[in-house]
Image: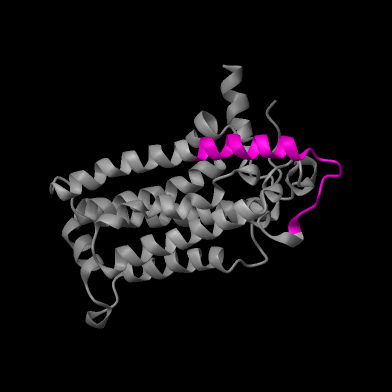
Amino acid sequence: MVGKLVRTPMMKRYLMKFAFRVAVFLGVLGLYLFHKDKLTEFATQPVYMGITPLHVLWIVFMGIMLTHIFPMEKRTMALKKAKAKEYLEVNGYSELELYRYIKEQNIRSWKVMLLWLSVNAVFGLLYLLQIMDCADLIMLSVFYFLMDYICILFYCPFQSWIMKNKCCVNCRIYDWGHFMMFTPMLFIRNFFSWSLFFTSCVVLIRWEIVYAGYPERFWSGSNGRLQCANCQDKTCQIKRNIAAKLQKR
């Protein structure tokens, strides 16, 4: 059933951030299409020679990742679930069911990781063979930057095909986004690219350490905060409405 969109504070925040990501994507795309050589130049130019648009973008990317490493209070429930104070224990939950859930989700997440690394290994090979260049990989990362929010708000192939989680709040790999965004940066050997990639690895590792240590926080069967009745974000609304409309056809 198609429902009316409830504009929660988090939904409004997501839509504003999505608009910003669209603007960033279009700006970099314009550079890529009409001044591709400048895109490579901007990425390799030292700061002491002048601030470029990509230096500003680097600050934005790093700032976003730092808010995940050192989380702020105003953030989605998908991230909050990693914090101890956000854990609302479901009385009498089955530890066996939790174990089964975690085991299944771990297998599914490894499938996502292997798929992602395999796809991006192809781009890396094309770069090493000089079929793709630095500007192509930067454009690819910015495309992933936009797709991250498309997956959250509109449609996520990983959710639909592999993870099978009901929403982003319950997503096992929610904080893998930055690692995925900056995977192409691994192949470009300079400070701009490697600083983004390795910082994204820190975000990923931090998430995995918390997940391994406190799996009960990540399952709606053991954490009441993750149940639909207690959701304050409701960022799944657009995605669910799209799915409902497609089912009607």
Taking the image as shown, residue 32 lies to the left or right of residue 109, namely left
Q: Quadrant of the C terminus?
A: top right
Magenta segment boundaries in residue numbering? 86-109
Could you tell me which residue is drawn at 22 percent across and 55 percent down? 135
Decide whether residue 90 is among the magenta residues: yes
Residue drawn 76% across and 44% down?
222
Left or right position of 186 against 24 = left
**Residue 216, magenta (yes or no):** no
Using the rendered image of the protein, determine whether residue 170 is visible from the camera's viewpoint. Answer: yes
In this rendering, is residue 7 above or below 20?
above
In this rendering, the answer to whether 19 lies above or below 102 is below
- Residue at the (48%, 51%) spot, across then down: 177
Front residue of this view, candidates 93 and 6: 93
Q: Main secondary structure of the magenta part?
A: helix
Which corner quadrant of the image does residue 106 belong to? top right
Residue 19 location (% of width, % of height): 49, 53
Quarter containing the N terminus: top right
Image position of 5 (left or right of 127): right
Position in image of residue 75 (x %, y %): 64, 60
